[in-house]
């Protein structure tokens, strides 16, 4: 998987660490991890949306 060019160097480093960590997960752990990340992303989107509506 390629690293997107629009990530900062620090983000690229964190992504590489996560890439190595998830290699060791079994299917159930990987699914749980994916759902947690997606949930956090949705919460972040909601917070940003609310912040933009009410500056």
Image (cartoon, grey):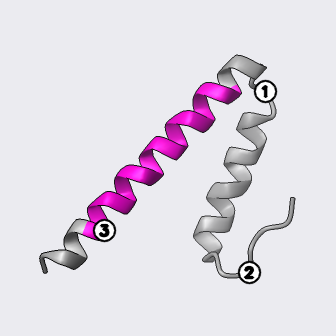
Q: Earlier in the sequence, mark 2 or mark 3?
A: 2
Image coordinates for residue 4, horizontal then vertical, percent: 74, 73
Residue 20, position as x, y percentages in the image: 77, 42
Placement of 27 over or under 49, stated as above or below: above
What range of the chain is rendered magenta? 30-49
Q: Give me the disc on residue 24.
A: 1
The structure residue drawn at horizontal position 68% and vertical position 66%, both measured from the top left corner, is: 12
**Disc number lying in front (2 or 3):** 3
Q: Quadrant of residue 39?
A: top left
Q: Which residue is mark 3?
A: 48
The residue at 74%/80% (across/down) is: 5
Q: Which quadrant of the rendered structure holds the C terminus? A: bottom left
Asked whether disc 1 touches disc 2, contact meaning CB atoms under 8 Å apart, the reply is no
Element at badge 2?
loop
Above or below, 34 relative to 7 = above
- Mark with earlier residue (3, 1): 1
Q: Earlier in the sequence, mark 1 or mark 2?
A: 2
Q: Where, quadrant-wise, is the N terminus in this rendering? A: bottom right
Answer whether residue 12 is magenta in the image: no
Q: Name the image quarter holding residue 33.
A: top right
- Up-down relation of residue 35 to residue 37 (above or below): above
Extreme front residue here?
53
> Are the residues flagged by discs 2 and 3 in contact, CB closer than 8 Å?
no
Which residue lies under the disc numbered 2? Answer: 5
Please tell me how crowded label 2 is: few (under 14), some (14-19), or many (20+) other residues with Cα within 10 Å.
few
Does dot 3 land on a helix, a strand or a loop? Answer: helix
Relative placement, left or right, of 3 versus 42 is right
- Please state the horizontal and vertical placement of residue 26, each as a whole percent of the image: 77, 19
């Amino acid at each position: 998987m390629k690293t997107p060019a629009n990530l900062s160097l620090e983000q690229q480093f964190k992504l590489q660490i996560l890439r190595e960590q998830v290699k060791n997960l079994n299917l159930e752990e990987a699914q749980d991890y994916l759902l947690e990340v997606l949930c956090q992303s949705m919460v972040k989107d909601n917070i940003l949306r609310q912040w933009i509506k009410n500056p």
